[in-house]
Amino acid sequence: MPTLAARLPRFPWDALEPYRVKALAHPGGIVDLSVGTPVDPVPDVVREALAAASDSPGYPATAGTRALRRAAAGWLARRHEVTVDPDAVLPVIGTKELVAGLPTLLGLGPGDVVVHPELAYPTYDVGARMAGARPVAADGLASLGPGPVRLLWLNSPSNPTGQVLPAAHLRKSVAWARERGALIASDECYIELAWEGRPVSVLHPDVCGGSHEGLLAVHSLSKRSNMAGYRFGFVTGDPRLVAELLEIRKHAGMIVPAPVQAAATAALGDDDHAGAQRARYAARRGVLRPALEAAGWAVQHSQAGLYLWAAHPRRDCWESVAMLAEAGILVAPGSVYGPSGTRHIRVALTATEERIAAAAERLRTLC
């Protein structure tokens, strides 16, 4: 039997290393737009809550504090018109951990199918493989037939494309899954960063008909609140599924540290800092998008999220990566996200104003 590592693809960003070296050699320094990692300060309200809770010698609760669960439920109601019982909120140690581990936590294995979008965050595929299940990339659900689909991943706004799925599309996906007894996990980590169009949660009554049965929604504070370094997210939805996940995570000791829980509680209760951060990203997008388009790349989808999804008429993704690296700009190749991304690049907005301006100036030399 092959080892677990042998069942997994190569870590995709390792292939970027030669281009990183090339971009670093640029006289003006690298502009790294390859990864969506925040560069702005953690909000004061978050840091103060973390510091106040730093004297935490005891084990925290796997379920999270009551205040944290109420704050998450309050944020969903206030910002996204979604009503959940606070007891159906479960904190996780960063959402990548949850995405990678969910098929295993749900008991999936050989013979089970995990469906994810054709252009997708690679961890959906990896999580299925870790459980021994079979990952299938498909956007057209009708083509899947009656096979043993156990889990369907949705992702709106999408990483990498920034596409926003309308409520009608999400509603059809929910109906399809329920007819087959499949579960839906909806990755909604970019839901607060909308530019064109309004993202809707799978838990919104217009999508699910008021019932969360068979549905999970995954949320993160990494992008909204610059808390990627805190490793915090939460999952909510079907109370039965959340209770099952909680029971397993208690056995495994998968617990968010108490100071991080306090910081997340403060972040979820404060919308002002999130609005300010969104404005920063909007300004950077307003500089970078026209510069990229003027240099010959066509931006597609990108209605929301932290990325511009762009294609060049004469270059595949790796040719674009190489050309931009020569200009000191590092971007992600679209092929990392699936075969249909081979002509695209993903360009992150996560750089300082000075670095974004430098990228725009360098792009002008490529026109």
Image: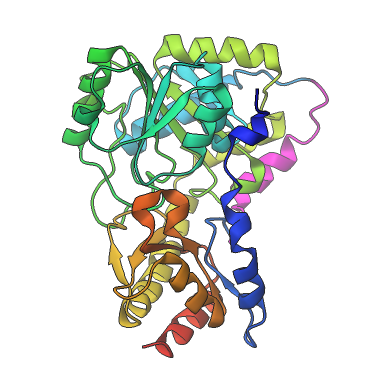
Indicate the quadrant where residue 238 lies.
top left
For the C terminus, which image quadrant?
Answer: bottom left
Q: Nearer the viewer, residue 101 or 315?
A: 315
Q: Nearer the viewer, residue 188 or 160?
A: 160
Residue 175: x %, y % from top left: 21, 20
Image position of 64 with respect to 168: above or below? above
| In this rendering, position of residue 41 left or right of residue 144 | right
Magenta segment, which residues?
40-58
| In this rendering, position of residue 252 left or right of residue 158 | right
Residue 294: x %, y % from top left: 31, 82
Residue furthest to the left in view is 168
Residue 185: x %, y % from top left: 40, 27
| In this rendering, position of residue 52 left or right of residue 88 | right
Indicate the quadrant where residue 213 lies.
top left
Image position of 329 with respect to 207: above or below? below
Residue furthest to the front in view is 1
Is residue 282 magenta-colored?
no
